[in-house]
Amino acid sequence: MTMTAFHRLLFCWCAVLVIALAFHAILARTISLDILEPLEAALLLIVLTCVYTRPFFSSSQGKEPTEKAAYMYEASLEPSPHDMTQGANPVLVEPVGLGVQASSYVDYVAYSEQRARATSSSSTTTVTRVPDEDGRRPRPRPRYYFLDYSKLFLTFLVVTFHVGDFFGAISYEDRYRIGNYDNPFRVAIRVKKFLCQSFFMSCFFSIAAFFTDKSYRRKGRMQFLKDRAWRLLLPSWFCTFVLNPIQSLIELSSSENPLAYHPFPGHCWFLLWLLLLSWVYMTLADAYALDGLHRTHQNVSKDSNIPLPRLFPTRLVWGYGAGSVATAILLLPGWHTFFTMPVKPGSLPCDIVLFGAGVLASRYKWFDGTDGFKLRDKLGCINVWVYRTLVFGLCAAGALAVVMNELDLHSYTAIAKALFLLAGCLFVELSLALLEFCQTNLNHPLSAFTEFLARSAFTVYLVHKVVIASMVALFVYLYNLPSMTIEFEEGLHYSSSVLRGPANGAWHLLAGYCFVCVATLTLAWIWAWGLMRVPFLRHVL
């Protein structure tokens, strides 16, 4: 097999990942995590800022493809019958700025796709797009409504997941929380935490990659970088140095600790890694196009539409493989985070795998149904209900493993391996099960209310941790009004005070959890609605 520029670049990125893992492993043994984590966060922020702010300072912006060039690329892919004009000779028009000296993916592909189609045509028919009378594109981009519903559901999961962290779902000493003692509610919330973190951020990466590919091919490199800088990089800086320190101040005040300014990325690690993976995607996409590999896919029909991998054995092999890597990483000392990404079930290798799957889903139309088959027909299982039963069984097995671990019915090492292997399978199958369910049952236009919820979901993701910290502090204050029950020891961020009520305070913890969830979801969406009405912010959010 010939090593093309694409393969060489892919090998280089894999080498960079290995070097970064080794760098983290060495430093984790030599310096404290209090120094390592801010160091890695600062390094990642600086590198991404240099990459994504380049178009604002570059003098070569005029050489980038225009919107018309990007449109010509889209128009050359799939003409529909009403777009065809009969009786003309094939004509190849090279757009301005395109050709051998192509500077980006869209530059090269817009020209080469038209050349391939014109030279390979055996008839005298010209395939063109006939614009509307007002000059607009004849066919709008499709709207994937089921993906809107999927993102909305995942946002609800993220908010309730982080609320659980404040009620005992985590065990880190530097995290603000209450209910840090053995009780039935903590077991239940940790089961939910495991099932959620096994797939939901990987599913977010998959959906984001799906639209990343379409956006990059439509806009070109420079415009894509600008949009990502406004939409992802700027919010990352704002959350790191403004919103998250406010959250920290609220937590310190509630736990009666000295106030201090503490900038940290927190939950915006997702934005930083989305920027990082998008950068990797851009370089690989450009190398892929300049190698001419897309021509091979155009000329070889069996490769022009790579199908969704089958359940047995492909997806299970990838799932358990990623889960095994995650297990090996977790068992190493000092792996709390890796360049801001939390090292948890369904994290690093799982996120990378599903980001790549999202790009392939965009390229080969796994979600489009243009071949007459929906996602439920491509799962590689006998029946969709058999598949859903299988996924439910995997979830039940994971829940049982968490309960065994919480009740000390087995050694921690053995349970950790089982958990991460299960998560490796769940991150693929739970994501597919969610997307299949939404495409089957919710692939219809959104109502005005759901449209508002979907459009505001990103803003809610940015602000929800501040709202959660405020609502938990309010719950602690209200709960202590009759008598001082929830107390924080000096110098600690968590409370081990046993709450009142039956089941060792579990019902009161459940009531507090529900109160904070409802209040956070309501106030976060109201806040998002207000922010999106600000003239400048509406273009960012």
Image: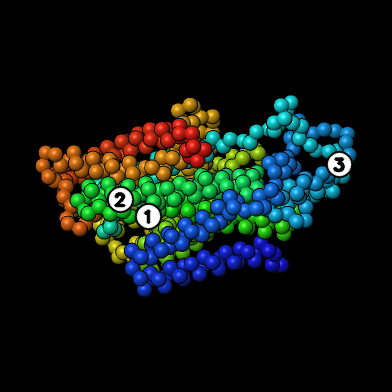
The amino acid type, in three-letter code, at marker 1 is Phe
Which SS class for mark 3? loop
Q: Is residue 132 visible?
A: yes
CA separation, marks 2 and 3? 64 Å
Residue 90's tag is 3
Q: Look at 24% across and 43% down and name the residue there.
A: 473
- Image location (x, y in percent) of residue 5: 68, 64
Name the residue nearer the viewer: 280 or 394. Answer: 280
The amino acid type, in three-letter code, at marker 2 is Ser
Which SS class for mark 1? loop
Q: Is residue 510 visible?
A: no
The amino acid type, in three-letter code, at marker 3 is Pro
The residue where tag 2 is placed is 248
The residue where tag 1 is placed is 264
CA separation, marks 3 and 1? 58 Å
Classify 363 as above or below 134: below
Q: Look at 41% across and 40% down and name the residue there.
A: 460
Q: Residues within 10 Å of mark 1 (few under 14, many from 20)?
A: many
CA separation, marks 2 and 1? 9 Å
